């Protein structure tokens, strides 16, 4: 014989509030076994307690109601486990992002930010011929776009029998930062004529004077290097309106471990007289083939 519980007793049995149980009824997630047509009182079967406990566990894990409904409606265990596994993987990804954000914040609070000129160099960059991909991109998409464009560039350069003559680089218009949407170019310096293919076009990357800081780690933590570079430029050099550059000394192509990636962040400047500590003595630069001198 089936035993029934009032909504209050079912609430106590499942640790779900009456308000929550009413909401789950309304959205069709956990419907009572019956509703009195005269009073509207809900009654629940004791057999529904395990289902309610599963629902509560899923909600504790942040699973959306629609996804819980899909799991409960799964026709077999394998399908159900696939849905649950997909949600657990999303949780693991979110946990990883949270842990990285916490580590970055702790580092920011406990370690001095790179700055004061330490590790910052002034460099003359000569014009260099390159294969390039240019597009207007949203900031939230720039990572995926960048990796795809870079892979296409390396494949095109190799396929056309050209020799890479320096590290890959990127040029980002101010709007990428100020509006989170703007023109971005990624390029690979190379020797020989580049034949247009797909998104790849030949490009003469113009020469420019740059203040340069090297950053190690994933792109998500590069803001500290940008901040240190901006502070140094504001104190010791005349900043110019112009696109920010980056050079990718070590990246995904070299290692999947983003902690080992090394990027040069470059700010266009106009040097005037005393510029403070540069990190190097004398005049530094890149030759036309993209190598440091």
Image: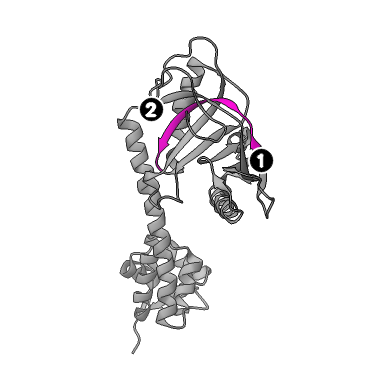
**Residue 150 sits above or below residue 208 on the image:** below
> In this rendering, which labeled residue sits more in front, label 2 or label 1?
1
Residue 212 highlighted magenta (yes or no) = yes
Provide residue 129's location: percent of width, then percent of height: 62, 38
- Residue shown at 33% from the left, 42% from the top: 103
Main secondary structure found in the magenta portion? strand
Q: Within 10 Å of the Cα at label 1, are there few (<14), some (14-19), or many (20+) other Cα atoms?
A: some
Real-space Cα separation, disc 2 to disc 1, in angstroms = 33 Å
- Residue that label 2 marks: 114
The disc placed on residue 98 is none
Provide residue 181's location: percent of width, then percent of height: 63, 41
Is residue 72 something that shows in the picture?
yes
Q: Secondary structure at mark 1?
A: strand
Q: Earlier in the sequence, mark 2 or mark 1?
A: 2
**Residue 179 sits above or below residue 270 on the image:** below
Tally of numbered discs = 2
Q: Quadrant of the N terminus?
A: bottom left
Closer to the camera, 246 or 205? 205
- Residue shown at 52% from the left, 36% from the top: 246
Q: Are marks 2 and 1 in contact (CB under 8 Å)?
A: no
**Residue at the extreme top:** 273
Asked whether, in this view, residue 172 is left or right of residue 75, the answer is right
The quadrant where residue 132 appears: top right
**Residue 18 sits above or below residue 30 on the image:** above
- Residue shown at 38% from the left, 23% from the top: 118
Q: Within 10 Å of the Cα at label 2, are there few (<14), some (14-19), or many (20+) other Cα atoms?
A: some
- Residue that label 1 marks: 203
Q: Secondary structure at mark 2?
A: loop
Residue range highlighted in magenta: 204-217
Provide residue 143's location: percent of width, then percent of height: 53, 48
């Amino acid at each position: 014989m089936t035993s029934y519980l009032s909504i209050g007793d079912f609430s106590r049995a499942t640790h779900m509030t009456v308000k929550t149980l009413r909401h789950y009824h309304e959205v069709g997630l956990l419907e009572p076994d019956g509703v009195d047509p005269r009073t509207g009182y809900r009654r629940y079967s004791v057999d529904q307690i395990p289902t309610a406990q599963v629902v509560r566990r899923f909600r504790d894990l942040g699973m959306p109601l629609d996804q819980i409904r899909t799991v409960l409606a799964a026709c077999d265990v394998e399908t159900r486990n696939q849905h649950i596994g997909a949600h657990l993987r999303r949780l693991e990804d979110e946990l990883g992002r949270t842990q990285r954000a916490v580590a970055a914040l702790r580092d920011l609070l406990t370690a001095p930010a790179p700055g004061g000129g330490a590790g910052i160099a002034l460099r003359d960059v000569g014009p260099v011929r390159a294969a390039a991909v240019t597009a207007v991109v949203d900031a939230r998409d720039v990572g995926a776009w960048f990796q795809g464009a870079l892979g296409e560039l390396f494949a095109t350069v190799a396929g056309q029998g050209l020799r890479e003559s320096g590290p890959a680089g990127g040029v980002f218009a101010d709007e990428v930062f100020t509006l989170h949407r703007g023109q971005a170019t990624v390029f690979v310096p190379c020797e020989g004529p580049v034949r247009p293919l797909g998104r790849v076009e030949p490009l003469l990357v113009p020469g420019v004077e740059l203040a340069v800081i090297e950053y190690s780690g994933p792109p998500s933590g590069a803001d500290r290097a940008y901040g240190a570079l901006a502070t140094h430029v504001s104190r010791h050099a005349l900043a110019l309106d112009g696109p920010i550059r980056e050079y990718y000394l070590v990246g995904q192509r070299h290692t999947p471990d983003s902690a080992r990636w090394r990027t040069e962040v470059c700010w266009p400047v106009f040097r005037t007289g005393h510029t403070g500590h540069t990190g190097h003595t004398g005049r530094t630069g890149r030759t036309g083939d993209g190598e440091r001198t």
